[in-house]
Image (cartoon, rainbow, N blue to C red):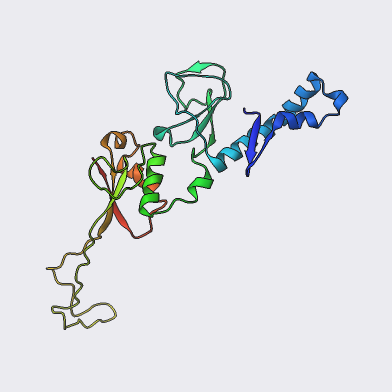
Amino acid sequence: MTSSNSLYGLTYNFDTYTQALLPINKRQTKHVKWLEALNSQTKWLNQNLNEYIYGVSYSTWSASATYSLYQRVKGGIINSNFVYESIASTHSGQPLNDAAYWQIVNNNFIGVDERMYYMDQKMTFEYALNRWFQTTFRQNTGVTMSGTQSDIYIEDNVVYIPAFIVGSTEIQSSVVYPTSSSGYIIDSLTFYPNKQFNIYVPNAVLATIPGTASGVRNFADKYNIAGIYYDVIGY
């Protein structure tokens, strides 16, 4: 666990604070260590709170890496982007779902301070998608040629609103009764939900997302406005 933490922009050192609780003539090693032990759970909880607020920059877990006690990692897409802490001494290759080696300390590596600004506005939406799936976001320059957009990008569709006719002609409306009507929507008109936009995801990334397209939707639907339809398309 780290010794210093930041809460709402204020940074302080837990170890210094612990020593300050003791009278000067009692700041011996045995007394300091005793208070640090008593204060360790508060330090741990405070670290979790700060990471929930501000997010983390830990490396993504790797089966080939070696981890030590209390070391933290990002789970990556396959592990729902949770933040994990090692609860065992030096080990390597232990999967994150092994409760003898790892515990979840946060369910999102992105801090709530950042996430509260996410919305379905195109550029912000693209940034959020690339941030979550850990791909590259590129600032929009107004150029739409291949290679200039972000790894995950959005393109709007032209939305066509079909005609809606009740009865057999535009001027003849049907008579509506409590349980029936004299007319109906004629068969020559086709009605379907319009897809207002598409989310394009590299095929290599899409293949790593649990549920593929539905996995993208699990994140995108948190910010997409209800009633707005879209497709997830690999490229």
Residue found at x 82% / y 20%: 28
In the displayed structure, 27 sits above or below 154; it is: above
Q: Quadrant of the N terminus?
A: top right
In the displayed structure, 48 sits above or below 223; it is: above
In the displayed structure, 92 sits above or below 218; it is: above
| Residue 148 vs residue 230, the one in the foreground | 148
Is 137 left, or right, of 172 in this rendering?
A: right
Residue found at x 30% / y 56%: 229
Which of the 4 image quarters holds residue 18?
A: top right
| Residue 103 vs residue 53, the one in the foreground | 53
Image location of residue 137, percent across then percent down: 36, 41
Residue found at x 31% / y 45%: 153
Q: How many marks?
A: 0
Image location of residue 55, percent across then percent down: 52, 39
Image location of residue 180, percent across then percent down: 24, 77
- Extreme residue in the right direction: 25
Residue found at x 19% / y 82%: 173
In the displayed structure, 163 sits above or below 133; it is: below
Image location of residue 84, percent across then percent down: 52, 30
Q: Quadrant of the C terminus?
A: top left
Which of the 4 image quarters holds residue 178?
A: bottom left
